[in-house]
Amino acid sequence: MKRFVWRLQKILDLRTQQERLQRTELFRITEQLAARRGELLLRRRLLQDLLAEIARTPSAQRWSAQEFFLRHAGTDDEQIRCLQEQVAALEVRRREKAAEVLTVRRSKEGLAKLREQAREHYRQGQDRLEQKELDERATITFTRPAATPGDL
């Protein structure tokens, strides 16, 4: 029996490889996003802790701590704003990459379905050929004994 060969197999292999690469990049972007979110939460938490500590200090010492905090609050706010922008940009990239992965996956699944249909069609054709061959053998076997050796 002939071996099944599908003409679009290389395209299916290419789609599989594309999906794998894009999923890897999606995971990388997701990791970056998680790291930036963690850093953002850490900075916010540090500011909250610092404010809580300043609030707990006696009023005589509080003025110098508040002055120091207010002097550097602009820098902290700028860093937090920068991290928020990075998080927003990474979220957009992650959504776009997820959409790309989904598109490639659907394309790959469609090709795989076509391949299975082609394989089933091929198998049915091979089964028909095999059945035809068996029928011919049965017919030959059935008609041969009817003929005697002297008739030939």
Image (spheres, grey):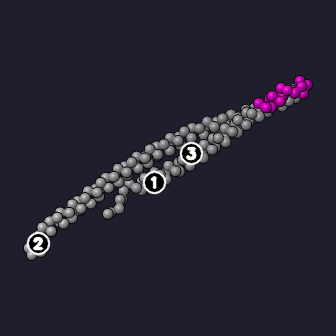
**Which range of residues does the magenta coloring cover?**
48-62
Please tell me whether mark 1 sits on a helix, a strand or a loop: helix
Q: Distance from label 2 to label 1 (Cα)?
A: 62 Å
Disc 2 marks a residue whose amino acid type is: Thr
Q: Earlier in the sequence, mark 2 or mark 1?
A: 1
**Quarter of the rendering occupied by the N terminus:** bottom left
Q: Relative to residue 75, is residue 14 drawn left or right?
A: left
Please tell me whether mark 3 sits on a helix, a strand or a loop: helix
Question: Whole-percent x and y of residue 119?
Answer: 35, 54
Q: Relative to residue 74, is residue 7 drawn left or right?
A: left
Q: Which residue is mark 3?
A: 26
**Quarter of the rendering occupied by the C terminus:** bottom left
Question: Whole-percent x and y of residue 125?
Answer: 28, 56
Disc 1 marks a residue whose amino acid type is: Leu
Whether residue 20 appears in this view of the structure is yes
Q: Which residue is mark 2?
A: 148
| Residue 50 covered by magenta stretch | yes
Q: Which mark is residue 84?
A: none
Whether residue 67 appears in this view of the structure is no
Q: Which residue is mark 1?
A: 14
Name the residue: 67% across, 42% down: 35
The answer to whether the residue labelled 1 contacts the one labelled 3, judged by CB atoms less than 8 Å apart, is no
Q: Relative to residue 68, is residue 142 drawn left or right?
A: left
* Principal secondary structure, stretch drawn in magenta: helix
Q: Distance from label 1 to label 3 (Cα)?
A: 18 Å
Q: Distance from label 2 to label 3 (Cα)?
A: 78 Å
Residue lying furthest right: 60
- Using the rendered view, name the quadrant where residue 46 is placed: top right
